[in-house]
Amino acid sequence: MTTRVGEARIASYNEAISAFKHQLSLPQNEASEVRTIVGSTPLAMTMEDIKGRALMKREDVDVIQLALPVSGDNENQVLNNLRQKVASLQEAWTGQRPSAIPMVPEELMVEEFLKLPSVQEAIENGQIPIGLELEMVGSVNISLSKFKHMAYVSNAEDTFDNITHHLLRTILKMPNVHMMLIDAFQEYESYSNQVKTYVGSKKEVSDIGNQLIYEIERRLEKGISSEWIVFIPNMRALVSESDLNVQQLQFMFENGYRVGMRFIIGTDYTYIGTSVDPIPRYLKTNVQWVIFGMRLMDQTFLDKGIYSRDVAPDPDQVYLHSRKEIIKLKISKNK
């Protein structure tokens, strides 16, 4: 039984076909399919199934034979001859060629991601390339000049870890941007020699709140502004191991970006989504950007947009949420 939606689609299709002055149909499985394209004609039943044979509708419907680029005694020979023909044409052509149709690869390594023209352009222009938009395949970027702070969240350990590596490796490629990695549990110590400042010892971590406040106040007083990303891959761990309190976090969020200190904070969803402690409560209501490595319907503090019915994304797919707009992205895969 054809539904009303199905009938509407058929009507739209027929209307689109009729808008063309000439219609052409190759042999189809059913004669009715041919008639749908060229109209009612007895030739739909009698057209021979020969390669290149077709029906063309102009004033009348006629049988035509299209020229074939190659010949062969069987399917394999035709295919091989066609490949050779294409290769010879490619070799002979010296003019301009169209760009390849952009496609998001099934698996994207960070080296490939960083070599993409749109990603390189973003980095050169002082933008953070977050990932690839799934339809247009272009890099989705955040300008440092407009970036204050971001949280990334997941309810799956492998996805969370993948996002962390993707962001670290991407930002480390940005010139004139220093990184401070505050790694309370030394989970990402492998990056200690790549970042400008690595904070991992218990002594350093315990007093980090006061140290960050001191640095921001010093910069405000002396008018210093150089670009730093303060990267905290485990906020729950940092809070448990340090003196950081919500008043300090608020001061950092409200003043850090003014002197070039911008924050990226990672946390498991249960900490930011369900905890009633002051710091996670402040984060979920004030952080500027959020990357979700999980189904949006499984979180409760931001709008779900058009993605409320999405299945769980792969570890290399995320949602970038600006509190106004949501974009689904492909990021690199850590191996």
Image (cartoon, rainbow, N blue to C red):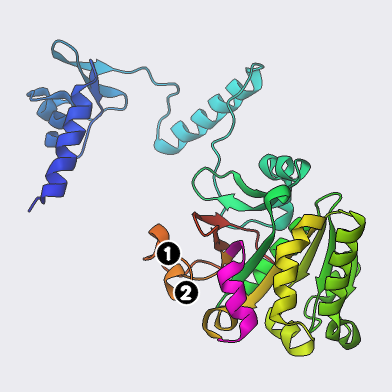
Of residues 54 and 279, the one nearer the viewer is 279
Q: Which residues are magenta?
A: 276-290
Which residue is drawn at the image coordinates 67% and 73% (left, top)?
266
Image quadrant for the C terminus? bottom right
Q: Is residue 246 visible?
A: yes
Are dots 1 and 2 in contact, CB under 8 Å? yes
Q: In which image quadrant can residue 257 be found?
A: bottom right
- Image check: 270 left or right of 189? left
Main SS of the magenta segment? helix
- Amino acid carrying mark 1 in the image: Lys
Which residue is drawn at the image coordinates 62% and 58% (left, top)?
331
Mark 1 or mark 2: whose residue is earlier in sequence: 2
- Mark drawn on residue 299: 2
Residue 288 shown in magenta: yes
Of residues 296 and 313, the one nearer the viewer is 296
Residue named by callout 1: 304
Secondary structure beneath dot 2 equals loop
Q: Please tell me how crowded label 2 is: few (under 14), some (14-19), or many (20+) other residues with Cα within 10 Å.
A: some
Q: Please tell me how crowded label 1 is: few (under 14), some (14-19), or many (20+) other residues with Cα within 10 Å.
A: many
Residue 8 shown in magenta: no
How far separated are the C-alphas under marks 1 and 2? 8 Å
Of residues 95 and 266, the one nearer the viewer is 266
Secondary structure beneath dot 1 equals loop
